[in-house]
Image (spheres, grey):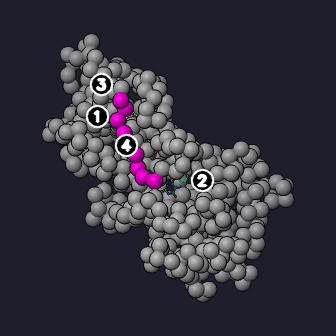
Amino acid sequence: MDSSSTMHTPSLDLDIAIIGGGIAGLWLINRLQADGYDCALFESQALGSDQSVASQGMIHGGIKYTLSGALTGASEAIADMPAHWQDCLAGCGDVDLREAKVLSDHFYMWSTASVTSKLTTFFASKATRGRVDKVKAEERPSVFQHPDFSGQLYRLVDMVLDVPSVVKALANNVKGRTFLLPPSQAQWQRDEQQRCQLQVNTANGPIVINAKQFIFTAGKGNGALLQQLGERTPAMQLRPLQQVMVKLDNSHRFYGHCLGTDKTPKLTISSHPCKDGKWVWYLGGSLAEKGVDLSAAELIAKAQHELQTLMPWLDLSGAQWATLPVDRAEPKQKKLVRPDKAFIGSAPGCSNLAVAWPTKLTLAPNLANEALGLLQHQNIQPQGSTADLSVLSALPQAGIAPAPWDNTELFTSPSASKLQ
Ligand SMILES: Cc1cc2nc3c(=O)[nH]c(=O)nc-3n(C[C@H](O)[C@H](O)[C@H](O)COP(=O)(O)OP(=O)(O)OC[C@H]3O[C@@H](n4cnc5c(N)ncnc54)[C@H](O)[C@@H]3O)c2cc1C
C-alpha cells in the first residue's frame, strides 16, 4: 500500500481491475489470474446478477441463427465455443469448470407442421456439418412421445449449462478477489494523464484503486459507468426481453427451440432445477422479444396459449407462472442487429480503460481471448508482484446471485382460464 499518492489517501496498485462480475468478468479474472496478472473484481450486487444467471444456459455453435439458409459469419465466429467449454468442464481447458453442472448435452429443434419442409431441407444440407440428427420417434424426449405430435424433431450436440453452478465454479477459482462494491461507495475520477482511478469509500476510509487497465464488464451497467466518467464510447445497445417461467408438476425436462418462419425461434424452452425441488420451464425466443410491452398477466396468457397450441397434450393445471423483464446488453450496432462476436474496445478519453460485452454467454471464452490480445497489444504485462488486498478488508466478498426461478415471490398460480 502506498500512502503518499493522491492527497494522502491510501492506494492499491493492480495490474487489472475488473468492474462487474457476470460471466464476462468472472471468466476474464480466471484467465488473467492464470496468466499471472495481479487483479481484483468489483461487483455492485451479487456475482452473476442481471443477465448471466437469468440466461437459458445454452452453449451453441451458431446453428440456431442459420436456419435462413447460408452459413453466416455469426456461426463461424462461435463455432469453436462448445468445444472450448467442454474442455473447461473436463478440467483440461484454460479455465477450470469441473465444479459446474451440465443440464443437458444436447438440445432439440422442432418445427410446427407449417415449416417442416423448410427445416428438413435445411438440416439435410451441408451447412449443418453432420452435427444435427433427426430424432427417431422412439428416441424422442418424454414430452414429445405423445401420438399427437406430428412435426419433425432434430437433435443438436450443443449443451445446456446450469449457469448458477458455472458462476460458483468461476468464483471459487478466484476466492478473495471478488469484492462487493455498491455504486454508492464507488467514485470514479481521472488523473492528469487521463487515466481513470476508482476511489472506494469503505468504513475504514477511502482507498484509491490504480490499475494499468480497468475493464468494465458490467453488462448494462457499462452505460452508467461510462457516463460517470463522461465517456460516450464504446456505446451500448439494450435488447429488452420478458421471459416467462412456469413451474410444472410433471417432470418433463426439455431443452429446445421451436422454429417458426422468423429468424428468432418462435419459442425457446429450457428446464432448470429450483431450490424447492421443482423444475421450471423457462420460455424465451420470440415470445420474450415480442412480449416486452405486455403486462405479466397478458404475457402469461400468451405463453399458455402458445404451449397449448404447440403441445396440446401438456397438462398445465396447477402450474405456477411468472415473468422476468430483463435486458440483453450488447455493443451498439447499426439497426440494432445482433452482434456476432464478443466485443472489447478502449474508451478514447481514458488511456487505461476498456469496455466489454460478450453478447452471449457462449462467447465468454472468446471475450477473454480478445481481452488478453488487447493487453498484449498495449504491452500490459503482469507486474510479477502481488498487491496486499487486505487494504480492502472492509469490503465483503460478493455473494452469488440467486436464479430468478428461486424468487418465489414472483410466482402466481392462476388457472389458464382466469388469465385469458
Ligand atoms: C433471458 C436471457 C437468456 C439468455 N440466454 C442465453 C443462452 O442461452 N446462451 C447464450 O450464449 N447467451 C444467452 N444470453 C446472453 C448472456 O446471458 C449474456 O450475453 C451474458 O450473460 C452477459 O454477461 P455479462 O457478464 O456481460 O453481463 P451480466 O451477466 O449482466 O453481468 C454484469 C454484472 O455487472 C454487475 N454490475 C452492473 N453495474 C455495476 C457497477 N456499476 N459496478 C460493479 N458491478 C456492476 C451486475 O450486478 C452483474 O453482476 C441470454 C440473456 C438473457 C437476458
The residue at 39%/52% (across/down) is 364
In the rendered structure, which amino acid carries the disc numbered 2? Answer: Trp
Quarter holding residue 198: top left
- Say which quadrant the N terminus sits in: top left
Residue picked out by circle 3: 195
The part of the image, by quadrant, that contains residue 287 is bottom right
Q: Residues within 10 Å of mark 3 (few under 14, many from 20)?
A: some
Residue 346 in the magenta stretch? The answer is yes
Q: Which residue is mark 1?
A: 213
* Amino acid type at image mark 4: Ile
Q: Position of residue 192 (x, y in %)?
A: 28, 17
- Residue 275 counted in the magenta span: no
Q: Which residue is mark 2?
A: 405
Image quarter (top left, top right, bottom left or bottom right) of the C terminus:
bottom right
Query: Which class describes the residues within 10 Å of circle 4: few (<14), some (14-19), or many (20+)?
Result: many
Residue at the extreme top of the image, as rendered: 7
Q: Residue at x 76, y 57 (%)?
A: 302
Amino acid at pointer 3: Arg
- Residue 9: x, y in percent? 28, 17
Q: Magenta stretch?
A: 340-348
Question: Image check: 60 left or right of 18?
Answer: right
Label 2, secondary structure: give it. helix
In the image, taking residue 321 as reference, residue 157 lies left or right, namely: left
